[in-house]
Image: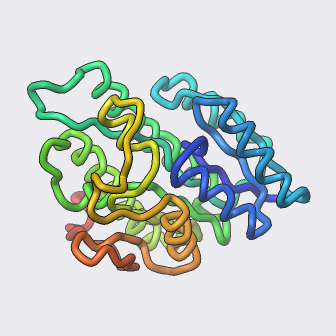
Amino acid sequence: MSYTVITGASSGIGYEAALAFAARGKNLILAARRLEKLQELKKEILDQYPEIKVNIQSVDLTDMEQVYSFYESLAEYELDTFINNAGFGHFGSIGEQDVSKIGDMLHLNIEALTILSTLFVRDYEQVEGAQLINISSRAGYTVVGNAVTYSATKFYVSAFTEGLALELKEKGANLQAKVLAPSATESEFAKRSLDVDQFEYEGNIKKYHTSKEMAGCLLELYDHEKTVGIVDGKTFDFELKDPIFSHAGPSMK
C-alpha cells in the first residue's frame, strides 16, 4: 500500500491537491501546522472516499528538528509521491522586511524543501513510478517587485528542482523530479503575505486561478513526462515544459 505525501495541506493548493489525489484512489499523508484544518480535510476526504487511508500530522516545517522528525515518521510507509507544497511569501521592500518572518520563510521555502527532497531522493531514487513535485511560483522564473526575497526563494526552488531532474535523468534513476510554478492563485497566500485578516482576490487581482484549478494543473504535471508546469504570465495558460534554466553540466568529473 503506497502513499502520497503533501505538505502545506491545510489550505489552498495543498488542500485541493489532497482532494484531487484522493479522487484517484491515492492514500494520503497530509502535513501542516494547523491540526484542526487537517482534521476537517480528513473528514471531507473520508466522507467522499471512505476506502482511502489518510494520515494527518501537525508539523511546523520552519523548525528543522520537526522537519527531520516528520521525515523519520514516514519510514513505516511506502511512498510513491512527495509534494513539497508548504511555503509562504512576504511583500515589502527589502529594507522594510520583517527579518524574523523572512527567516521563517527561508527555513520553510528553501531549507525544509531541500532537506525533505534530499531524503526522499536517497530513499526512492530507484523506485519505479516515484515522483517528487516541488511547488515553486511564476515568481520563481520572473523577479517580482516588492516581493524580491520571496521571489528569490522560489528561484531557488525552480533551479534546485530542475537541476535535480536533470541529475536524476543523467543517472538513469527511476524517480522523477518536477516543479509546478503557479501565478496568482486564490488562497490564503496573499492574506498571510500581507499580514491582513481578509483579502479578496476579486477586484484586487486582475487574473488568478482558483486553488482547485491549480490542483488540476498539478495533476496534469503529475501525469506528464515534462519537468516544469508553469502558468504563462500574460495569457495565464498552463504549459508543460522541459527545464527552463540553462544547464552547464557537472563542474567536476
- Horizontal side of 158 relative to 248 (left or right) equals right
Q: Quadrant of the C terminus?
A: bottom left
- Residue for point 55% across, 31% down: 67
Residue ranking furthest to the front: 203
Q: Quadrant of the N terminus?
A: bottom right
How far across and how far down the image is residue 24, in percent? 74, 70
- Residue for point 49% across, 26% down: 64
How far across and how far down the image is residue 214, in percent? 48, 65
Residue ranking furthest to the top: 100
* Viewer-proximal residue among 206 and 63: 206
Q: Is residue 187 above or below residue 246?
A: above
* Viewer-proximal residue among 25 and 36: 36
How far across and how far down the image is residue 36, in percent? 69, 30
How far across and how far down the image is residue 156, in percent? 29, 49
* Viewer-proximal residue among 144 and 242: 144
Residue 125 image-quadrant placement? bottom right
